[in-house]
Amino acid sequence: MEGEQVLIEATGAVLPAALAVALSPFPLIGIVLILSGERGRRNGLLFAAGWVIGLTVVSTLVAVVFGGADDPDSTSSAVADWGRVLAGGALIVLGARKWWKRPRGADHVAPPRWMASLGEATAGRALLLGLLLSGANPKNLVLTASAAASIAEAGAHDADLVAAITVFVLIASCTVLGSVAIHFIGGQRAASFLDSLRRFMVTNSNVITVIVLLLLGVSVLGDGLSGLGRR
């Protein structure tokens, strides 16, 4: 029963960060553009594989590094709390900066230039892009590290650790994996839906990103301060 409680606690702790990763606009825009290309099915699967691998590697490494964080008096626990304080502050600053630099008035909102040729991406580029957007993107890196530290602090080990990381990765990947699944089973209607979703995300990417960054920043910062206050 104790193992189940640890897993439930770890899963609950990673939900906010996992949903924040899943709602990132650019990966969703990217996967839709890739799926609409000439070899969309192959490249879409490779992008999704890269995305899942990137999240899995980062979360596993952080969870292993903070393996002793379930002891409140341990150095690992203190480092994790201070890390949350810094990460939460960084997310808030990123959110405020994003809002300050948002397009004003009738400014045209367009995806980054690197997305322009995603429809003609090679297999290697699709895989690499998935890896980079999930594992090397600064915002996702902070969120994934925070979630993995929460898993370690919950005391998840062995099978529970694997299960908790799996839950995090699946939730954080639900929009990317869901887009691929919709493309495979939905035909032309799915293509129209995904393109509408892409346009919505392009138009509202700044607002979505700012809201996610600020809410998660406050949450992560609060968790870190609470942990430090208990010492």
Image (tube, rainbow, N blue to C red):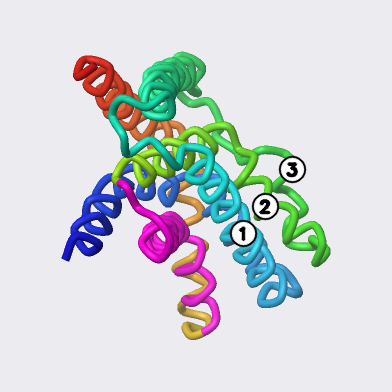
Picture quarter with the C terminus: top left
- For badge 1, the amino acid type reads Ile
Where 143 falls versus 174 (above or below)? above
Q: Are marks 2 and 1 in contact (CB under 8 Å)?
A: yes
Is residue 123 in the magenta section?
A: no
N-terminal label among 2 and 1: 1
Q: Secondary structure at mark 2?
A: helix
Q: Is residue 43 left or right of residue 24?
A: right
Q: Is residue 104 visible from the viewing direction of this image?
A: no
Q: Quadrant of residue 108?
A: top right
Q: Which residue is mark 3?
A: 114
Residue 148 appears at what percent x and percent y?
43, 44
N-terminal label among 1 and 3: 1
Q: Which residue is mark 2?
A: 131
Q: Residue at x 28, y 29 (%)?
A: 72
Q: Secondary structure at mark 3?
A: helix
Magenta segment range?
Answer: 155-184
Q: Which residue is mark 1?
A: 53
Q: Residue at x 56, y 50 (%)?
A: 27
Q: Nearer the viewer, residue 146 or 46?
A: 146
